[in-house]
Amino acid sequence: MGSSCGENLRLTIFGQSHSSAVGATVEGIPAGERIDVERLRAFLTRRAPGQGELCSPRQETDEPEFLSGLRDGVTCGAPLTVILRNRDARPEDYDSIKNIPRPGHADYTAWVKYGAARDYAGGGHFSGRLTAPLCAAGGICIQLLEREGVTVRAHAAEIGGETEPEAMEAAIRRAKAEGDSVGGVVECELRGVPAGLGDPIFDGLENRIARIVFGIPAVKGVEFGAGFASARLRGSENNDPFKLEDGRVVTATNRCGGILGGISTGMPIVFRAAFKPTPSIALEQESVDLEAMRPAKLRVGGRHDPCIVPRAIPAVEAAAAIAVYDALLSHRKERL
Amino acid sequence: MGSSCGENLRLTIFGQSHSSAVGATVEGIPAGERIDVERLRAFLTRRAPGQGELCSPRQETDEPEFLSGLRDGVTCGAPLTVILRNRDARPEDYDSIKNIPRPGHADYTAWVKYGAARDYAGGGHFSGRLTAPLCAAGGICIQLLEREGVTVRAHAAEIGGETEPEAMEAAIRRAKAEGDSVGGVVECELRGVPAGLGDPIFDGLENRIARIVFGIPAVKGVEFGAGFASARLRGSENNDPFKLEDGRVVTATNRCGGILGGISTGMPIVFRAAFKPTPSIALEQESVDLEAMRPAKLRVGGRHDPCIVPRAIPAVEAAAAIAVYDALLSHRKERL
Amino acid sequence: MGSSCGENLRLTIFGQSHSSAVGATVEGIPAGERIDVERLRAFLTRRAPGQGELCSPRQETDEPEFLSGLRDGVTCGAPLTVILRNRDARPEDYDSIKNIPRPGHADYTAWVKYGAARDYAGGGHFSGRLTAPLCAAGGICIQLLEREGVTVRAHAAEIGGETEPEAMEAAIRRAKAEGDSVGGVVECELRGVPAGLGDPIFDGLENRIARIVFGIPAVKGVEFGAGFASARLRGSENNDPFKLEDGRVVTATNRCGGILGGISTGMPIVFRAAFKPTPSIALEQESVDLEAMRPAKLRVGGRHDPCIVPRAIPAVEAAAAIAVYDALLSHRKERL
Amino acid sequence: MGSSCGENLRLTIFGQSHSSAVGATVEGIPAGERIDVERLRAFLTRRAPGQGELCSPRQETDEPEFLSGLRDGVTCGAPLTVILRNRDARPEDYDSIKNIPRPGHADYTAWVKYGAARDYAGGGHFSGRLTAPLCAAGGICIQLLEREGVTVRAHAAEIGGETEPEAMEAAIRRAKAEGDSVGGVVECELRGVPAGLGDPIFDGLENRIARIVFGIPAVKGVEFGAGFASARLRGSENNDPFKLEDGRVVTATNRCGGILGGISTGMPIVFRAAFKPTPSIALEQESVDLEAMRPAKLRVGGRHDPCIVPRAIPAVEAAAAIAVYDALLSHRKERL
């Protein structure tokens, strides 16, 4: 189905890149939680476009409007719906490439799945614009998690193959200058997650986090703890020994990324998401005219980021917060 | 909740390592599908232990017993339940380490989550034994997918850092001789998947496959197509150009792994799963006695694999088949 | 969780009686369906208040605003979100009875469940106002069902114990004049439903329809076909004999209400929903002051209907259409 | 999909009337709960056939076999699977009527839905036999609810139009002597349910209970509290006034059946389910030969109950217990 997820925190994302609004409905937030709208606004601003020469100049203020779920700024137990108007929509930008799918985008697969009725403008429901309501929902979950002692922090671990901030920025500039784009890796850490969250088999924290993180466009890989590197370690190197610290059980190392058997160990949860380079590039590309069914060349106009990673960082935090807060709510029911 | 997944194909996995049986219930298989039990048995044998010096000597014939869902070997539309008896169960092997969690296993997190009532024998419901019913369900899905023209094949892409079969085997032998273990990477390819399967955002094929593959114990990373490597490519290198081939739209390369916007392109679906080294090793390890709350050393006895990758290959195929067959069933409802 | 339902048509209802809007998100509508907004508006008007002396004078034009899911008035495959602004909200009407639960309403149970943070104005999320987005979603499903040859019609079968229209109206007038209220029974019929829709056990058409119809406030009973009366029949009277008619299998009678084993027979689906009398009455009632924890009397002000049945008729049609259209979508996947 | 239900208690029912076993998997039972198997056996015996001249002579001892989820008789947190072998299966009894659907049964609709592959023996997955695993799951929930202070009791309120035990029995005898059958009404009461259980709109207790009770074959109506009778009351008669009793808020009457706005009031939950007369009767009936597509007469052989109500009573208790225990588990997560 696609646009909803969650067990005891149920999230539904709606909207298209150029519809009148994008938004999110969140069911399951306990009543009595005050939402700090100023902070949420600040969080959304980290994701918003139009903030500098290295990102898309599309202007969206991303002012959250709450349609339901609050009374005097406090959750009342009813589903919370927050919308963000699409103010700077320019669907006409996309008319020229309506029948020529952009490589690396969902244009072709959306055409196969939905046919002529698809909303092709800006990728429609597949657009990165949909990370705005994801961040609105996730920004709220971050606030709720903090009240439980959990913090969520992500950063760019790698951009264009570079791992130092200055080199990363230079890589983006170079790509931009050449009409090209670069990808990268976002690393996220959650501290303070109590031990015991998550479930066996299909609802482990890895499964839950991966399911939502793969919901961010351009993510092509997710790994936890030592991840793919652990495949090259010996068991004696990769196993995290248990020890006591201030009367608590901890692990001496954290190669498992804070998760064993799908369940939190109480150590920081650490994961990385691989982002492919932005598929929208200024260079000419080969494609196909789906109406005429013949080869076609295209050059993607519109307003795009030469690297999506900087703006994706809050989206990764949001995704992680949604997954972990849901696991936290599910966890409670198991205790009398 | 953990042990069930799926949208229009609903799978529930039950059993513990040393309960009287493990099993799977699958709802949603269309009526009229003949199950080739011989082939299923052969598929289960690829996963079964006791098959050579490099794998656990536990003897399980893994004979599938169908409790429901079939009439004369053909699906009748009712939920299909298949069980595999645990014949060579030895729960007493685990009594000595009941209170001393094995590093890298779910022993500690299961203790936190379920307390004294947990089934600690052999990891209980967290055991690799649960991949047997996963393979039973997945082996059936593989048969059903083949009737739709889809093939599923996985192989070991890397073991202990080695990529050549002989070197992989040597790496396992070395680790075993040293009482240690190695991990690896399984690569899986699905050919013949029609374009248009999958959904936006949270139910893309990446999300669906990752959710189930992370259900295989020891998986710590999943990547699609170029995956983490795509993070180091330029957009101009990573984008797969569209072209026409025999009147069909295809991509000239397949760095996206056959998935764009969560939806199949019609090209092969390719993904890799990282397996950590088997946590059970013969070497002495540091742990904690959870009852006495003091440091403890342990040496894991029991019957274990120095590398789980060879036996995990069918489990990865099973997981992929379950995810993709579910997406296929969901896809049909969208067409009149 | 409460505010969402459905399998392949997923509906989420949000809003409170006096929040800025109420709305619905519907996932799963196939792409390419034109929504006739004029007809939807007309359908919503049947439910809207302010239409005569026998119903609440609250003025709500119930103009549907589509935030997403459409392109040029046609569904594009993305979740469809429609909202209805609450224009004539007067939350202050309810301040005086904030701590004194109205008998027959959800005020007391909402207080127990959500505590002080609940939205008590007009019943909050429990208000009959939430049938507006239900009707918006259901009105769309009615249009979609008609394209499949299915019609949905409900009518008042009984009001205040009367079964003739004039007597029903007189019963409402009498109750209103006395500051009291009356209940009634709505009967709904769906014609043209193909045989084979529905599922065994928990997702039969009875279960699916009942689950949604009980979502309409004031419904206290649901019965199918002969319903409670069938409990007094002999098997030989109640069984519907099969016969052939124009080469099709039909039943000579339809005491089963078009459903056997949870699955449609192809005959009209017939059910009845019992509505209790509107709990808001002008007469003085006994209650409790929840803050002072002492007895209290109250007289319900605000704007209310002496009988909810006339305005509930489209809500029953909407509920039935949502349930049956979901079953129809689920049905398709079972056919190759 | 049909055979599973529940939110935080997830139940899956499998098996056919004449498959090798019927069974249930229950996910979500907290770890540490001892199952009293003797009591469960006694509960199952109330439902079992072969117990007297007024019920089906089919011999099923219904001995529960636990495949998973327990360690030493105590729940361990993993999914609990319990099966009941079908020992006295006689699928050949049904060969003669394979193509002639029995009026009032699911034979015809199963044929439409599943085609030739359906399991027609004894109704397959639609059989009343499936109430055995429902009772196994529900019997466990009854034990768990009792530990929370909740009792569940159902009784026959009406059989064949009679409300006195002796008259009911006489009605069954008369019907049996005439080769016919009678229906009835089962009333169920749950005492000790804490206030605050249930959710708004689609997951109210009415919706939850109705969804599962309609899963019992032959149920054609469900009503809560005054139910259909409330449709004939005035609001001033039907509203339950609140009052204080020993410092607790209670209602002076309980016409709402202990549920307001879908949420428990703390008063007894009361509902009634209408059972149609057993469709299997010895009298000759009109039907159709689905292969030859011509009229056919049939006389139902096999082993049947002239009235299902006595054996359905534990099934109603089971259904109610499953619904309410699930709501209880869901409720907990909302409290910190």
Image (spheres, coloured by chain):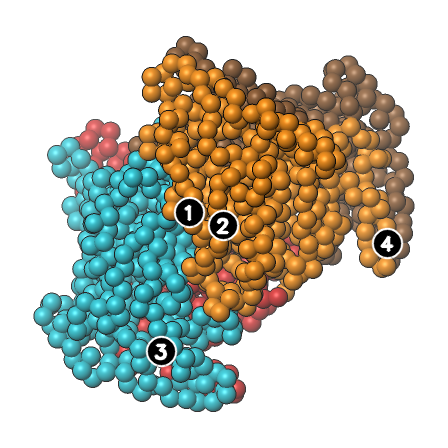
Chain colours: A orange, B brown, C cyan, D red
A216, D209: nearer the viewer: A216
Kindly state the secondary structure of the residue where label 4 is placed: strand
Q: Is residue A138 above or below residue B196?
A: below
Residue at the spot 20% in from the left edge and 47% down from the top edge: C151
Q: Amino acid at mark 3?
A: Asp
Q: In the rendered image, which residue does mark 2 sit on?
A: A61
Q: Is residue D220 above or below residue B263?
A: below
Q: In the rendered image, which residue does mark 3 sit on?
A: C93
Kindly state the secondary structure of the residue where label 3 is placed: helix
**Left or right of A52 in this view: D5:** left
Q: Is residue B314 visible?
A: no
Quote the CA–CA distance across marks 3 and 1.
Answer: 36 Å
* Chain-order first, disc 2 or disc 4: 2
Q: In the rendered image, which residue does mark 1 sit on?
A: A87
Tag 2, which chain? A
Quote the CA–CA distance across marks 2 and 4.
Answer: 49 Å
Front position among marks 3 and 1? 1
Quote the CA–CA distance across marks 1 and 2.
Answer: 8 Å
Residue at the spot 36% in from the left edge and 86% down from the top edge: C298
Kindly state the secondary structure of the residue where label 2 is placed: loop
The lab-note entry on whether marks 1 and 2 share a chain reads yes
Tag 3, which chain? C
Q: Amino acid at mark 1?
A: Arg
Which residue extends farthest top? B246
Residue at the spot 73% in from the left edge and 43% down from the top edge: A257
